[in-house]
Image (cartoon, grey):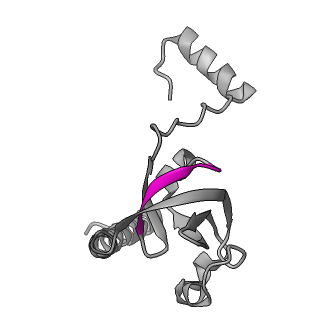
Amino acid sequence: MFALKPVHIVLLIILAVLIIALVVLYFLGKRMQKKQAEQQEALDAAKQTVSMLVIDKKKMKLKEAGLPAIVVEKTPRLMRNSKLPIVKGKVGPQIMSFICEEKIFDLVPVKKEVKATVSGLYITDVKGIRGSIQPPPPKKKSKFKQFTENLQKKGGAKPL
């Protein structure tokens, strides 16, 4: 009859493990998407617009940010040591710490008054009160990145 060599058996086992891993990741990804959609709906339901004076913004650890103790307790242990974008602002007579969305963190101006869309302690959107918010100037490229772009231009490749 037809006999498989040991190399073929090992390759078949590796292929089966990879297929199982992909199927598991697919279903976990779908579940995580559903959770994210539910969380986004909850954020949208609780959002409100407030005017605040931005005092400071930094990326810092959750424990150092000065957030309420219940927030630190409710976060997963793995996330407690990661750095989050934190914005300190004056809302009315109070100075509070807020967690900012990663994509708008660079747009938040320091020492200026803004209208922020806030959901709890989470800033989801920022608009300028007096005029528009200026985007930050583009960061200077490193020598290596400039070198690779020049090589790509000379070679006729599309830049990454």
Asked if residue 31 shows in the view, the reply is no
- Residue 100 higher or lower than 139, as above or below: below
Measuring from the top left, give residue 35's x and y in whole percent. 31, 76
Quadrant of the image occupied by residue 155: top right
Q: Nearer the viewer, residue 83 or 18?
A: 83
- Residue 156 higher or lower than 41, as above or below: above
The count of marks equals: 0
Q: Nearer the viewer, residue 28 or 116?
A: 116
**Left or right of 13: which side holds 111?**
right
Reply yes or no: does residue 117 show up in magenta.
yes
**Which residue is painted at 27% across and 75% down in the image?**
38
- Residue 6 higher or lower than 155, as above or below: below
Q: Main secondary structure of the magenta part?
A: strand
Measuring from the top left, give residue 14's x and y in whole percent. 43, 67
Measuring from the top left, give residue 135's x and y in whole percent. 52, 36
**Which residue is painted at 44% across and 76% down in the image?**
120
- Quarter containing the N terminus: bottom left
Measuring from the top left, give residue 71's x and y in whole percent. 55, 84
Asked if residue 153 shows in the view, the reply is yes
Q: Which residues are magenta?
A: 110-118
Quadrant of the image occupied by residue 5: bottom left
Q: Nearer the viewer, residue 122 or 150?
A: 122
Residue situated furthest front in the rendering: 93
Q: Nearer the viewer, residue 144 or 76?
A: 76
Residue situated furthest top in the rendering: 154
Reply yes or no: does residue 61 show up in magenta.
no
**Left or right of 72: which side holds 40?**
left
**Which residue is painted at 52% across and 35% down in the image?**
134
Quadrant of the image occupied by residue 94: bottom right
